[in-house]
Image (spheres, rainbow, N blue to C red):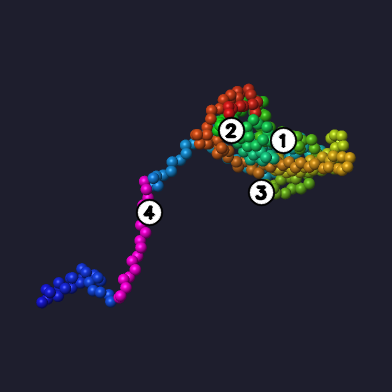
Amino acid sequence: MRRTVVAVALLLVVSGCNAFPTGGSEDAPEETLTPAEVPTAESLRTPTATPTECLAPRVAAPDRSPAATPTTPAPLPTENGTVRGAALVTRHAAALANYSYALRMDGTRVESMPGATAFTYEGVTLGFESVQMFAVAGTVYHLHQTGAGVSVTEQPYPGDAATREQYLNDLTGRDWLAERVGPYNYTRVDTRTWNGTEVRVFRDDLDAEILVGAGEALSINSTVLVDRRGVVRHVRHVRTVRSDDVDEVVNTTDVETLSVPEVGTVTVERPEAFCVPRSEVVTATDSPTETDPPGTATANG
């Protein structure tokens, strides 16, 4: 008798809840299961990176720490309470040549290591034959972007003394300053902080109108900020020409600016524009020689 009971119990366990009716008149709704999407072999592959080619080498890490900011301002030659703009320009160029820096000049951007041993340039203000340049390891690379693709022409750098001097004059903003600041006499009007740096504020307001042509007169409002090193950190140069017409007086105003937001802390790096997909690289020809002045290189395409 005991064996029979065990057999019945075992039957109930094996049958589960379907062994007896539940007493309900309706079947329970069946759950609908959506099968999970099985990744294909194609979707599991890692995307292949587009092969790129860098058309210029990297810049080596600087081998010296930036010089400390002087505790006292560098003296500026003053006569009768004013300092000549030409003296400000000369002191600026001499001081900036010893430091790394970033410079903004109207629509142009420059980053340079001390002495312009390596630099990047992007813009049209200085009139180079390429709107983007990069100097490193004794070579200047001129980037050319055309419908055919991207190419680079090379020029030995710094080349001869005259070429080196011209680059320094351009890249430090010396020539730009000589044209706009050099001709005027400035009066020191304040000392304040600009971009986290203590600067001396010089100003020249040329109220007396200078005749520049038939029926035309010129007025100047120029402000120059100079740091303790003697570097011109910011210029705002406003030039207004008044033209007397028969019926009315017309004023034409040009506002030009130069800024040096960083001095001594800049590390030049290869611009991203010099590394492009290999499919976009085209062959450059007619690389300039060492005797060619800046702005004479050409490329095919």
Q: Going 46% across and 40% down the picture, which residue do you hit?
A: 49
Q: Which residue is mark 3?
A: 196
Distance from label 3 to label 4 (Cα)? 58 Å
Decide: marks 3, 4 in contact (CB < 8 A)?
no
**Nearest to N terminus: mark 3 or mark 4:** 4
**Nearest to N terminus: mark 3 or mark 2:** 2
Decide: marks 1, 4 in contact (CB < 8 A)?
no
Q: Going 36% across and 52% down the picture, which residue do you hit?
A: 38
| Residue 286 falls in image quadrant | top right
Q: Which residue is mark 1?
A: 176
- Comparing 290 with 46, the one in front is 46
Q: Amino acid at mark 2?
A: Thr
Q: Which residue is mark 4?
A: 37
Q: Secondary structure at mark 4?
A: loop
Q: Going 67% across and 44% down the picture, which residue do you hit?
A: 71
Labels 3, 2: front one: 2
| Residue 261 falls in image quadrant | top right
Taking the image as drawn, is residue 99 in sight? no
Labels 3, 4: front one: 4
The residues colored magenta run 24-41
Distance from label 1 to label 3 (Cα)? 24 Å
- Comparing 12 with 217, the one in front is 12
- Comparing 159 with 46, the one in front is 46
Q: Position of residue 206 (x, y in %)?
A: 83, 41
Outermost residue on the right side: it is: 246
Labels 1, 3: front one: 1
Decide: marks 4, 2 in contact (CB < 8 A)?
no
- Comparing 234 with 146, the one in front is 146
Q: Position of residue 9 (x, y in %)?
A: 18, 73
Per the image, is 29 magenta?
Answer: yes
